[in-house]
């Protein structure tokens, strides 16, 4: 089954919001045995919307739309699909009763503009949406399917999982795609590519390399009739690539730096405490994105002003001698965090997130220190000038990378 | 000038990464007087890529591609454009010298696969890329332009800003689009829509409403020959809409809850301190995303374990009596944060981010407390069950909303 995804909305077209729905839907199609060929974004314009949906319906079997199902005048997905199908929409009495009930239960009169959310056309049916007022549409005729889902991600994802995906699974093509992503750090894309070049001839699994924020990823994709069979194709290749790339491989698939590091800490009985300045709590937040991180993360302190650093226990003399933006201060922050929160490893981050320089040090200067009870402190200092949030994000990735290296030593020591 | 954007890469097509480049580029086009009609995503497939670029070139004047310029076998943008143009690529000696120099300066021999990054075709020229090894392409023939930029966002954005946008500005159409977004909170989309319905007839500026995570946005877009003229069209409408919507309006355009709140704090000489449990530092991180927040944000404590809360000063008796997940504990956290960091307002957040319930309280239970020196503490408790990161994000939005409300009182009091 060949599919195209159409994301609808002028806001998405103009880039005022990033289209996360299309990525979500696309990532769920391979496991249903559905091939995706194109994704499109069209604004709230009836002609262009109908043109895009019509062309997609000419060349593909399944068109999945999101957005444009709201109650307002610029929500035109229903109108466009009706035009493509050459069918007239009518108000469905059951949908109308449900929608009026929804508003009544909130003690509000239904605005009359909402009535078009009760429309259906002869070739279609509505898809329930308990999270909002816009039902979806499932339109099916001449062996082709058009699915329309609402734009708000929480409404769309629920509708996808509970209503659309199960229905599509029943119509599966018999061939599914399974992927494996091998994640590396500390090696350039061309070098990774050269090391695995002879393997790249492989068609099934196919192999691709991608430069990402957390390193280079190698992606294997295998097509087969069953998941088990696909894994039989992937696993030998997975092993061979890991053998060729060696220790630069740090994880696979959904592994993140933070999830890997939390797993390693739990395995070793290590606990972490942080003291952050320029990253403003982002490191703590990223670590606590990992489910179950409460067993290895003691806590963190965000010392955004110099005096709060001193109150937290960083010696004023170190700040006086070396400055707030210094390797020495970062090292003290790591030590104080570890000691104060009785953790086995502390991380300290200080730097200049911008927009202005500080102590004569340029924006993007960052010092990341790690103080673990099992080895001497490490500090990494660098300058990374790409804007405030990128500086924060990069500092957090650096800190997690340092922590991983330190935890690897911990294992080696305990093996001695 | 009519434009289409083509994002290239199987990873983007399959939704393994979200396409932020297309949003970035699209958001920059209106100010250049360029209309965007479509955005497309195509995988690393030569035929479909050439088909998409070819069709776009048939109906539009400008095609902007990103991705597929890497050195590896699945990077096919150059090949696809050459096919569309019917031209043969050749190695440019100057580009080759630059690229070999780049590798030499890093003490590495250039992998021979990189040579295709030195290609050009007769109708085109390379666009410099000091942030990476892949130059862009500017292809121009028969009054149509194809621009190809690398996929990594830091490389693409620099190339856009320094090389592509200035060139496109010179060819501007004489009509530009200026937008104004009015941001509201606490009112549903249909109600906002009804309040401004008669105005929606307006064609220039056009008016649209959008439900967003931080409330409903009303977006005005005006077309004119100059920015000044466009603003003359927008401002009376902007004023009228704000008058109709009243106090639910909290900001415009790039304003975020956090930027607004930081501005209000600076205006009032208020300083903030936080103590976070289930949000794990995200509130502190979001506040410190605002440039200049160091003047109003004292610091934060992430007390991810019960004992770290007690060590930080939350009375053990309160936790014993009411539980860690309670309005009372949140209130104590807010007070302790404010007092310990000598701030004028403290925020405390405790809750269950998941995946497991805690103290018999379900995942998504959150208590947000605010303790300001100018009024009695406020606590907001609710349950929001949408997954770990959504629970964190929503709690932070709630905290910033509470803080805004509290700061509004502060102004009123000081006016008395």
Image (cartoon, coloured by chain):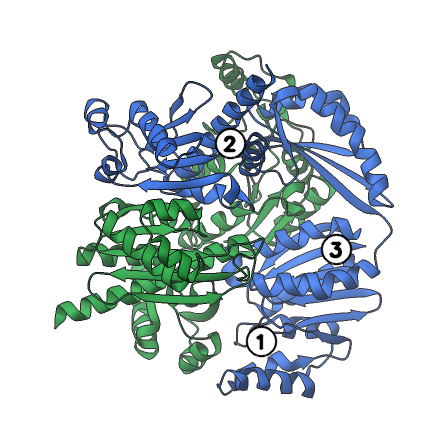
Chain colours: A blue, B green
**For numbered disc 1, what is the local secondary structure?**
loop
* Residue at x 79%, y 32% (from the top left corner): A235
Q: Are marks 2 and 1 on the same chain?
A: yes
**For numbered disc 2, what is the local secondary structure?**
loop
* Residue at x 57%, y 32% (from the top left corner): A264
| Above or below: residue A152 compared with residue B296 | below
Report the residue marked by disc 1: A133
- Which one is in front in this view, the residue at disc 1 or the one at disc 3? 1
Left or right? Give the position of A311 relative to A376: left
**For numbered disc 3, what is the local secondary structure?**
strand
Q: CA distance from mark 1 to mark 3?
A: 27 Å
Classify 10 Å Cα crowding around label 3: few (below 14), some (14-19), many (20 and above).
many
Q: Is residue B175 visible?
A: no
Left or right? Give the position of A19 relative to A36: left
Report the residue marked by disc 2: A270
Q: Are marks 1 and 3 in contact (CB under 8 Å)?
A: no
Looking at marks 1 and 3 on the same chain, the residue that comes earlier in the sequence is marked by: 3
Q: CA distance from mark 2 to mark 1?
A: 48 Å
Looking at marks 2 and 1 on the same chain, the residue that comes earlier in the sequence is marked by: 1
């Amino acid at each position: 089954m060949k599919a195209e995804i159409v994301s609808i909305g002028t806001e998405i077209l103009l880039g005022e919001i990033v289209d996360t729905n299309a990525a979500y839907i696309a990532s769920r199609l391979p496991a249903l045995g559905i091939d995706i060929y194109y994704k499109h974004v069209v604004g709230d314009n009836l002609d262009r919307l109908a043109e895009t949906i019509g062309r997609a319906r000419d060349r593909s079997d399944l068109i999945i739309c999101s957005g444009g199902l709201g109650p307002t005048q610029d929500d035109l997905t229903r109108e466009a699909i009706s035009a493509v199908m050459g069918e007239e929409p009518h108000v469905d009495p059951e949908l109308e009763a449900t929608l009026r009930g929804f508003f009544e239960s909130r003690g509000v009169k239904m605005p009359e503009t909402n009535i078009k959310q009760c429309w259906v056309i002869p070739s279609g049916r509505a898809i329930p949406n308990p999270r909002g007022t816009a039902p979806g549409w499932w339109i099916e005729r001449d062996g082709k399917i058009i699915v329309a889902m609402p734009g708000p991600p929480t409404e769309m994802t629920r509708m996808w999982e509970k209503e659309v995906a199960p229905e599509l699974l029943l119509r599966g093509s018999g061939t599914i795609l399974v992927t494996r992503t091998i994640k590396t750090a500390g090696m350039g894309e061309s070098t990774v590519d050269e090391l695995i070049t002879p393997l790249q001839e492989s068609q099934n699994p196919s192999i691709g390399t991608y430069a990402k924020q957390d390193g280079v990823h190698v992606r294997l994709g295998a097509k087969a009739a069953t998941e088990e069979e696909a894994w039989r194709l992937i696993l030998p290749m997975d092993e061979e690539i890991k053998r060729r790339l060696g220790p630069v491989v740090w994880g696979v698939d959904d592994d993140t730096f933070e999830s890997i590091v939390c797993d390693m800490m739990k395995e070793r009985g290590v606990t972490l405490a942080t003291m952050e300045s320029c990253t403003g709590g982002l490191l703590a937040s990223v670590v606590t994105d990992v489910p179950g991180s409460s067993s290895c993360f003691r806590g963190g302190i965000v010392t955004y002003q110099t005096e709060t650093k001193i109150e937290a226990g960083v010696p004023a003399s170190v700040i006086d001698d070396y400055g707030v933006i210094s390797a020495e201060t970062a090292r003290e922050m790591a030590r104080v965090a570890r000691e104060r929160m009785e953790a086995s490893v502390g991380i300290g981050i200080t730097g200049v997130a911008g927009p202005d320089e500080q102590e004569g040090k340029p924006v993007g200067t960052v010092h990341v220190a790690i103080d673990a009870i099992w080895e001497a402190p490490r500090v990494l200092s660098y300058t990374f000038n790409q804007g405030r949030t990128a500086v924060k994000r990069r500092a957090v990735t650096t800190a997690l990378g340092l922590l991983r290296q330190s935890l690897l030593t911990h294992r080696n020591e305990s093996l001695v």
